Image (cartoon, rainbow, N blue to C red):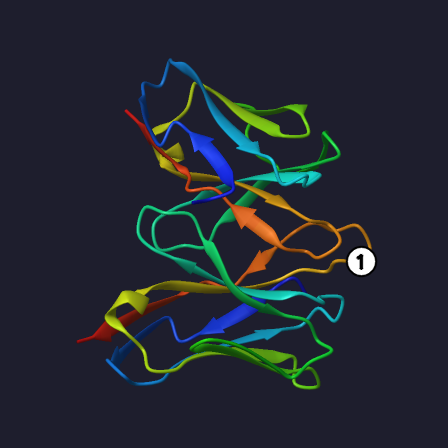
Amino acid sequence: QQQVKQSPQSLIVQKGGISIINCAYENTAFDYFPWYQQFPGKGPALLIAIRPDVSEKKEGRFTISFNKSAKQFSLHIMDSQPGDSATYFCAATPTQGGSEKLVFGKGTKLTVNP
Amino acid sequence: DTEVTQTPKHLVMGMTNKKSLKCEQHMGHRAMYWYKQKAKKPPELMFVYSYEKLSINESVPSRFSPECPNSSLLNLHLHALQPEDSALYLCASSNRDTGRHTFGSGTRLTVV
C-alpha cells in the first residue's frame, strides 16, 4: 500500500514536444502529490504539487493531471526544452495521521533532444 | 538557492574514519530528514526527526548516528562505514501542515 508506481523509466522527446510521465498509487491516505526534478549531483527540487481536491494544476509549462478514482496522476511538460533534461520523481505523502514519509516513484530520466 | 544547506558538499573518508554531515534550515520546519540516494535510484529514507525527537529510523545500521541539536540543525555522524555506503546523502525539512518537503543539495560521500 506504500508504493508509488512510475512510468516510463526513461523518455526521449524532441525539443518543443510534450513529455508525459505517469504515476499510480494505492494508499488512499495519500493527500499530497509532489513532482521533483533532479539534475545530476544535485538534490531533488520541488517542481509542482497537487492535492486530490483538484483535477489539474498548471504552472508555466508544467501541468499535473490528477484522477482520484483511478488513483493516478501525471506530469505534462509542454514545449519541452533541452534544459528540462533531468530525472523526475513523483511522490506521495499523507499530511494527516502523523506519517511524515514521502513515498517516491522510481524515477523517469527525461532527455530532450535539440 | 536552496533553503536547506548541507555541508560538506563532497567527502572522502576511510573505513576507520569518523566524520559528520551537517544540515541547516531556517524555514521554521519542525520535521527534518536524512535520505540516502544511490545512482539512478530514488531517495531512500533513513531517519525522521519531528520536533527535535527521532520519530522514524528505517532500520539503518548503527554506523550511521543522527543528531538534532535544535530545530534548525541536523547532523549525521558516520563511523566505520563500508564502501557500499558511498552515495549522495540528502537532508530535507518539511512543513507538516502542507506536506511540502524541501531538499538540500546533498553531500556526495565516497568511502575508500
Question: What residue type is disc 1 on?
Answer: Gln
* Picture coordinates of residue A76, whole percent (x, y): 45, 80
* Picture coordinates of residue B34, whole percent (x, y): 55, 38
Image quadrant where one finds the N terminus of chain A: bottom right
Q: Which is more toward the observer, A11 or B80?
A: A11
The residue positioned 35% from the left and 19% from the top of the image is B15
* Picture coordinates of residue A48, whole percent (x, y): 53, 67
Q: Please state the total of marks drawn on the protein image.
A: 1
Q: Quadrant of residue A39?
A: bottom left
Q: Quadrant of residue A33?
A: bottom right
The residue positioned 67% from the left and 41% from the top of the image is B29
Q: Secondary structure at mark 1?
A: loop
Residue holding disc 1: A96
The residue positioned 50% from the left and 79% from the top of the image is A63
Position of B72 with respect to B85 (left or right) is right
Q: Which is more toward the observer, B28 or A65?
A: B28
Q: Which is more toward the observer, A42 or B28?
A: B28
Q: Is residue A90 above or below residue B84?
A: below
Assess disc 1: are there few (<14), some (14-19) or many (≥20) residues with their C-alpha within 10 Å of its C-alpha. Answer: some
Image quadrant where one finds the C terminus of chain A: bottom left
Position of B53 with respect to B17 (left or right) is right
Q: Is residue B9 above or below residue B80?
A: below
**Of all residues shown, which one is farthest toward the right?**
A97
Q: Quadrant of residue A9?
A: bottom left
* Picture coordinates of residue B38, whole percent (x, y): 38, 46
